[in-house]
Image (spheres, grey):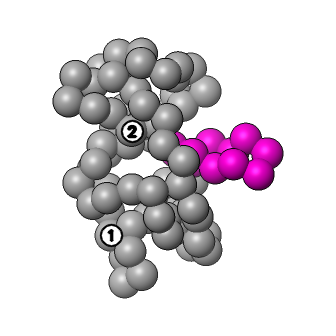
Amino acid sequence: GTINLGTSVNGITLPKKAVVEHGAMTSVWVLDRDNSARMRIIKIGKAVGDRQEILSGLSEGERVVVSGVEKVTEGSKVE
């Protein structure tokens, strides 16, 4: 599934399960206009409960994959 980005006092937050860590690199899957997944490198801040603060790499209103992220590949269509 996807969600629209929420905001907090300090900026954007996402459910932790949407954040993918690859060693020192952290990313999320963002959907383009055609619902195709695109990997986006992000910088994370503090974790608050089950949410992760996003310091940079995303803009409000972008759509991010939050479930099934382990199955997503670059360019794959997401319903």
Picture coordinates of residue 47, whole percent (x, y): 61, 70
Mark sitting earlier along the chain (2/1): 1
Amino acid, disc 2: Val
Q: Is mark 2 on a helix, strand or loop?
A: strand
Query: What amino acid type should be assigned to the residue bearing mark 1?
Result: Thr
Q: How crowded is mark 2: few (under 14 residues within 10 Å), some or many (20 or more)?
A: many
Per the rendering, the mark at residue 30 is 2
Q: Name the residue under label 1.
A: 7
Q: Could you tell me which secondary element the residue under label 1 belongs to?
A: strand
Judge whether 58 appears above or below 64 on screen. Answer: below
- Part of the protein shown in magenta: 18-28
Q: Where is residue 64 in the image (x, y as percent from the top left)?
A: 38, 42
Report the residue at 40% width, 27% height from top: 37
Please, is residue 40 above or below residue 14 in the view? above
Q: Give the main secondary structure of the magenta stretch.
A: strand
Which quadrant is the C terminus positioned in? Answer: top left
The answer to which quarter of the image holds residue 1 is top left
Tell me the mark number nearer the camera, choosing from 2 and 1.
2
